[in-house]
Amino acid sequence: MNGLQTYYTLTSRDTYRRDRMSERTGDFWTPNLESLKALILERDALCVECGEPYRAQLAWSRYCRRCQIVLLNAELSAEQRNAAAVEAERQGRELSRRRAWLNLYNAKVCTFANLKPRPKEVPALAEVKRTVEAWSRGENEPFLTLAGEPGTAKSHLAEAALRVVFERGEAARFEVVSDLLTRLRDAIAEDGNQDKLLGQMIDTPWLVLDDLGRHTNSPWVKDRIYTLINARYRRKRRTILTTNLSEQQLADLLDQPLSDRVFDTGSGVVRVCVLVGKSYRTGVIA
């Protein structure tokens, strides 16, 4: 015979395991019809596990039917435990990856539950809160603009919404606009390629862009911000924008086309909420 030859190793689970071995060794067993007939003859035997007599149907059988089932279930349970451990490790890595991507490292964790409006502001803030909660569930318009004076809980609400999305198991990202611009500049300095980072911001399913307008300005800044916001606007990606600027102030800073998208309430893509009142940080009306 040439090449590889198939032979069978007899196992304690009453099965064949088919292996391939090189003919060069010459010390393997090649079954034939007569030897196989001898192997399937029934015989009386004692189970090596429980010691009970049983009727063996195969010559190499060592376990009664009951013990075979017990041993097989034990093997399956071990396999299931191993599979569960592998899956738990995978989920742990995925959770760590999503947490790092979330980009929230505040000392104070902002949630909907720990937002405490002042008595006079309860009705207005409660309405905005319901709007943001609906956005976090994937309801209403994909773009949500939170505008208002500093300290009026815009960032708190945006972070709370992203935490709901994160706990649901989806990828979400919180970006302060000025920090994002710094990283884009760093990417250019390192390898001249900012497109990868910008592409990640465009493609992430849920994104908060915080403090739009509180950054240095230049033609490059205008281009990068417009590219990001316009791409997400056109693709209807779930996005929260927070800003201290009015529509006209944003147009003066970053040009009218961008302001039109941020405050666009006529297309069904953007919902605008304006928050008013004293600063939660200082207690002063800006």
Image (cartoon, rainbow, N blue to C red):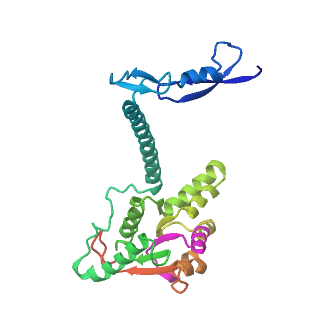
Q: Is residue 110 above or below residue 131?
A: above
* Residue 78, image quadrant: top left
Q: Is residue 285 visible?
A: yes
Q: Quadrant of the C terminus?
A: bottom left
Q: Residue at x 33, y 63 (%)?
A: 110
Across and down, in percent, residue 233 comes to: 57, 74
* Residue 36, image quadrant: top right
Across and down, in percent, residue 43 comes to: 45, 22
- Residue lying furthest right: 2
Q: Residue at x 39, y 59 (%)?
A: 167
Q: Is residue 55 above or below residue 98?
A: above
In magenta stretch: residue 229: yes
Q: Nearer the viewer, residue 72 or 111?
A: 72
Q: Nearer the viewer, residue 206 or 214?
A: 206
Q: Nearer the viewer, residue 283 or 126?
A: 126
In the image, the segment drawn in magenta is: 227-248
Q: Is residue 218 above or below residue 7?
A: below
Across and down, in percent, residue 77 comes to: 39, 38
Going by the image, does 46 lie left or right of 176? Answer: left
Going by the image, does 279 lie left or right of 61? Answer: left
* Residue 261, image quadrant: bottom right
Q: Is residue 194 visible?
A: no
Across and down, in percent, residue 104 comes to: 41, 57
- All told, the count of numbered labels is 0
Q: Nearer the viewer, residue 170 or 196?
A: 170
In magenta stretch: residue 17: no
